[in-house]
Image (spheres, rainbow, N blue to C red):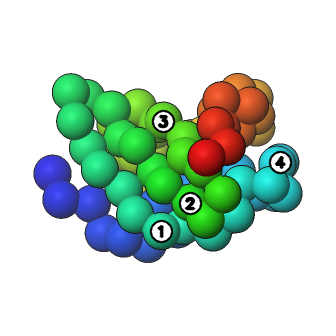
Amino acid sequence: MNYPVFIFHELVLRFSDINRGIGKYISATIDNGECLINTTTGHIKVALSMLEKQYNNPKLISEEELQQLASGFEIG
């Protein structure tokens, strides 16, 4: 599926509420069932299931899931 770019922007905004160091969305690539979202300060890996939730019903993503993903943010 081709995801609209606003999905990635929304996820980065949600992550940055938890970790201010995440920066702003730059680009995203999808490979092998995983999405790599690049930001101005690094990157974060997100499962396609998370993109689906963000696209179809963002309320299905728990705060715990967001915190877990935000903690996986890699600088650089």
List the residue tagged with mark 2.
39
Q: Residue at point 70% right, 63% down?
A: 23
Residue furthest to the left in view is: 1
Q: CA distance from mark 3 to mark 2?
A: 11 Å
As shown in the figure, which amino acid type bears the numbered disc 2?
Thr
Task: Kindly identify which residue carries mark 3.
Answer: 45
Which label's residue is closer to the chain start, 3 or 2? 2
Q: Quadrant of residue 33?
A: top left
Q: Earlier in the sequence, mark 1 or mark 3?
A: 1
- State the separation of the CA atoms marked 3 and 4: 16 Å
Q: Measuring from the top left, give residue 62's x and y in whole percent.
A: 68, 35
Q: Are marks 4 and 1 in contact (CB under 8 Å)?
A: no
Labels 3, 4: front one:
3
Chain-order first, disc 4 or disc 1: 4
Q: Which mark is residue 26?
A: 1
Label located before the other in sequence (1 or 2): 1
Q: Identify the residue position indicated by label 4 in the image.
A: 18
Q: Secondary structure at mark 2?
A: strand
| Badge 2 density bin: few <14, some 14–19, many ≥20, Cα 10 Å | many
Point out the frontmost of discs 2 and 4.
Answer: 2
The answer to which quarter of the image holds residue 21 is bottom right
Residue 54 placement, left or right of 23: left
